Image (cartoon, grey):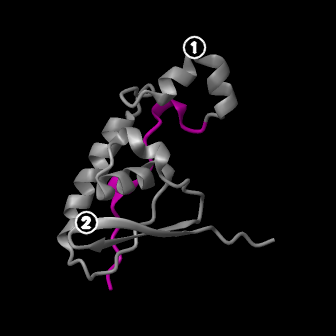
Amino acid sequence: DELCDFPAFDERSFGDWEGSRWDDLTVSIPEFDAKWIDNSFSPPNGESRFALFDRVRSALKQTVLEHAASDEILIVGHGGSGHAILCSLLNYPIEARSTLPELDNGSLTIVEQRSKEWHLVGQLPAEVPR
């Protein structure tokens, strides 16, 4: 049992947009929606979705893919990095990220390796105390 911190699994860097409200960005940036869905677009001083996926893929090679199929590994991440992890393990292209389950804060997504292939086996919603 070992705890490791891998910054490569951090969320996408939004650069100068960090801390901005979505509504403010859509009003202040021309063609924001088109830029947002473009995987090659980088916010000023940030990273593109392609760069995020490359970073995560590299980290998976250094971590998950070096373990035995029977090892249990927990990765705590964010929505963007979580989709990059799932696409990488499931061999989905980046364009297929929208077909994956939504990754809500605090949710748990379970993947399992069987016969050298990864499978999405379940997702548990976050338990939000009321």
- Cα separation, mark 2 vs mark 1, equals 42 Å
Vertical position of residue 89 compared to residue 96: above or below: below
The residue carrying mark 2 is 117
Query: Which structural element holds mark 2?
Result: strand
Q: Position of residue 40 (x, y in %)?
A: 36, 28
Report the magenta residues as a range.
Answer: 1-19
Which amino acid does the dot numbered 2 rest on? Glu
Q: Residue at x 64, y 23 (%)?
A: 26
Which amino acid does the dot numbered 1 rest on? Pro
Relative placement, left or right, of 39 versus 98 is left
Q: Residue at x 34, y 80 (%)?
A: 72
Relative placement, left or right, of 84 versus 105 is left
Vertical position of residue 73 compared to residue 19: above or below: below
Is 15 a magenta residue? Answer: yes
Circle 2 Cα neighbour tier, 10 Å, few/some/many (<14 / 14–19 / ≥20): few
Is 6 a magenta residue? Answer: yes
The residue carrying mark 1 is 30
Relative placement, left or right, of 89 versus 95 is left
Q: Residue at x 40, y 28 (%)?
A: 42
Q: Nearer the viewer, residue 6 or 126?
A: 126
User: Which quadrant is the N terminus positioned in?
Assistant: bottom left
Relative placement, left or right, of 88 versus 43 is left
Q: Main secondary structure of the magenta part?
A: loop
Q: Quadrant of residue 106?
A: bottom right
